[in-house]
Structures are given as structure tokens and as C-alpha cells.
Image (cartoon, helix red, strand yellow):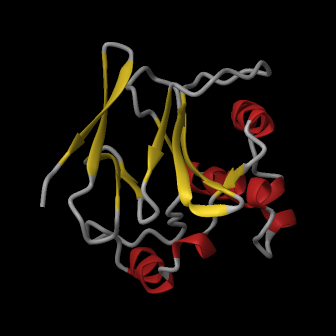
Amino acid sequence: MSRLWLTIACVVILSGCAPHRSDLASSLVSNQNTSLVAWLQQHPAFRVASDDDCNCADDIKEMRESGAWGKPMPTFQPYSKIGDFNHDGFDDLAIIAIRKDDSSQRKFLIFNGPFSSQPRPPALSQDTYPAAALFYEPPEHPLIIGPFESEGCIITARNGRYILDCFEG
């Protein structure tokens, strides 16, 4: 199964809002899910953001049909990505969580792999703004967070930490 399908599975299972929930449940890698579920249990006011939280159906459709870099991304999800963001050879999980009672309060989380049955805290937990979405197309493009049609912030791993390099303007 592709990384993007695993990403969709994480979002669908944890947000409980997509109609194809049971179809994707079998694609979920439970060890990837363990740390995220533990974080959500420790932060019950939050849930994983879904496409509906974006209020950007046209942008999502454009990404799926044309892509950000001229390559269609049919399984594009604005709030979750799986990839080797810290370049250690293991897949990591990036998610945007949203506060249940205030959709303007959001957290950007990265959980580093390798994943095991034991949950671990996120390597990055940072407040983010409501318009933020995640973009990732390896190997040419790193993980980026920002609104659609913006320069956004490039997320890089340096010395065991994630750094957001943001562009002004």
C-alpha cells in the first residue's frame, strides 16, 4: 500500500468523518497510529483535522487533479503526510490536529519513526494557524506547511530537531 493511502487511513480512522472508513481501515499501520492515538488521549480537546475543516474543496480538487508541482496527487490530504522527514531511513507522521470546540486552535505534530507498539511523544508539537495545510512530494520537495498558494514554511530536521524555515510575503 502506498504512503499516501496510509496517510488517508490515519485521517479517516482518527477523524471518524469519511464515508470510506471501513475500506481504508485495513490499510492502517497500527504502530504508526499508536503514538497519535496516545497523544489524542492525552489531549482530548483535539481531534485530527479532516478535509471539511479546510473549507477549501476547490483547492483540494486542484491538488488531486493537477498537483502543486504539476503532477496530479489523487490521494492528497491537506492535514496528514507520511514520509522520512528527518532523513533517518524511517517513515515519520505529520498531522494537524484541531481543537474540537474552537477550530481556530490547531497543532502541527510530527511523530518520528520507527514506530513500535509503545507510543512516543511527538518530535514537534507547535501551534499553527487555521489556514495551514501540509504539502509533501519527495524527493524533489520537502515537507511544507502553509496556506494554499503561499510560500509556506519548509520543515527541515537539524541536529535532532525540526526547524521551520518560513518565507515572508
Can residue 81 be seen in the rendering of this structure?
A: no
Q: Position of residue 57 (x, y in %)?
A: 51, 83
Q: Quadrant of the C terminus?
A: bottom left
In the rendered view, does 62 fall on the left or right side of 47? left
Q: Is residue 57 above or below residue 38?
A: below
Expressed as whole percent of the image width and height from the top left, the position of residue 66 reads 35, 78
> Residue placed farthest to the front in the image?
102
Figure label count: 0
Residue drawn at (38%, 20%), measured in percent from left and top? 161
Hey, which quadrant is residue 121 in on the image?
A: top right
Farthest residue to the top: give it.
159
Identify whether 48 is placed above or below 71.
Answer: above
Instruction: Give x and y (percent) for residue 65.
Output: 42, 81
Q: Name the outermost residue toward the right.
A: 22
* Residue nearest the viewer, comparing 135 with 151: 151
The answer to whether residue 114 shows anywhere in this view is: yes
Determine the image quadrant of residue 135: bottom left
Farthest bottom residue? 58
Say which residue appears at 13% left-offset and 54% top-offset: 168
Residue drawn 42% across the image and 57% down it: 129
The part of the image, by quadrant, that contains residue 159 is top left
Please state if 30 lies on the left or on the right of 22 as rendered: left
Image coordinates of residue 141 in percent, x first then y, are 27, 49
**Most foreground residue, 125 or 94:** 125
